[in-house]
Amino acid sequence: MKGPVTITGKAVEIGHLELKYAHTRIRNKKAIIRLCASILRFGQITPVIVVPAEAPSYVLIDGYLRVAALRRCGRDTVDCHICSCGEQEALIQVFARSQDRKWEVFEQAVLIQSIHMKFGLSHASIAGLLGKDKSFVSRRLSLLELLDDDMREYVRQGRICLWNAARVLAPMARANAEHAGILAKKLSEQPVSTRDLAVLFSHYKTSNKKNRREMVERPHLFLKALETKRSQGEAATLADGPEGKWLKDIKVVKHILLRLNKQSGVVLHQNQSAFDRRLMLTAFTDAKAAFLQLDEQLRRCDDFFGNTADDSGVAQKRGSETSNQQVGETLPQGGAASDKQGGEKASEPIHQ
């Protein structure tokens, strides 16, 4: 039976540390810079965790960012907590204490894979030791299975963020590993924000093979062209004003109504339940009420502008026939006639 694990504190030379699990950590440059500032101001606050190796060496279990920051600060030694247990137990204990540090999904996946390969533990055994269910282990390992070695290294080095790898590269690799590899290389050379990459992937899923290839080979050019098109559309909308936008919207409504008309025989049928039929017809009634409100508003607006136009025409005609009369005297007569004529003319298109 194993005895209790003892922990002793000691300052160890950084050169005596074996960084065997560096590949399981994501290198976060911003975090290292923040740690450097803290170390220069307050010194090392939290010791790293190590286990004894062949003297005078120690295997670094946890604290890889701290060691990188200490090196950046020019320090030669690191404060350590030396555990008397072996590597396997130390790794499991550090991993299980997830509340002590924030583990990225990628880090969890690589560490689980390392424990599995180095110590021969099954996925179920690792899950039990971590106090997790087997699906926890399977979900994390599935991410690694979709990312090739180059992609994993890009993520570990911080050249590709984990969100881009998990939400875009992994699903893309499932469908087309070649395209995912090409895109990963491009992103490692010139990063793209998660928002822009999500937009690119959305277009990728609905594009043909030729366009997909161009997207992954020249992602930045595609995003630039997309932004240019969007800017041109905004400029056109600004130039057209609210009238242009209204005209586009009403055309869209027209096409929607035509499509709904064609589908009405499908969505309303004899075998339909009363609830479903009532649901459909209630939605139609609401839409119809909104359309009638628009119709009424257009009638008021059209009557107003129609009367104004007719008044001007009648005034000009009267003025040419009787030049000795004042314009003010002709307007009431023309206005009375145009109220009737303009209103009737304006109402004709509405009823068609």
Image (cartoon, helix red, strand yellow):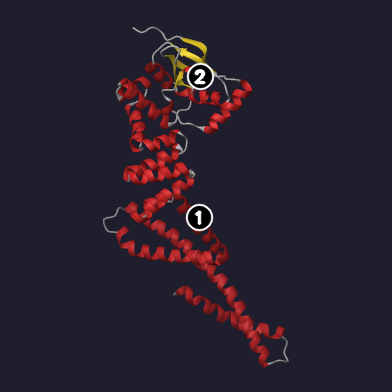
Q: Where is residue 126 in the image (x, y as percent from the top left)?
A: 34, 22
Which of the marked residues, 1 or 2, is nearer the chain's N terminus?
2
Which disc number belongs to residue 14? 2
Q: Could one spot residue 179 in this view of the protein?
A: yes
Say which mark, if any, is on residue 227.
1
> Please, what is the three-letter code of the amino acid marked with disc 1?
Glu
> Is residue 182 rendered to the left or right of residue 250?
left
Q: Residues within 10 Å of mark 1 (few under 14, many from 20)?
A: few
Q: In this view, does 93 lie to the left or right of 31?
A: left
Q: Residue at x 34, y 38 (%)?
A: 146
Residue 313, quarter of picture: bottom right
The answer to which of 278 and 67 lies nearer the viewer is 67
| Image location of residue 306, percent across then percent down | 58, 77
Residue at position x 56%, y 82% in the image: 341
Give the SS element for disc 1.
Answer: helix
Task: Give residue 265's position: percent from left, percent from top.
Answer: 30, 62
Q: Is mark 2 on a helix, strand or loop?
A: helix
Left or right, 234 with respect to 273, comes to right
Of the 4 image quadrants, the one containing the C terminus is bottom left
Relative image position of residue 340 (x, y in whole percent): 57, 80
Q: In which quarter of the image is the N terminus?
A: top left
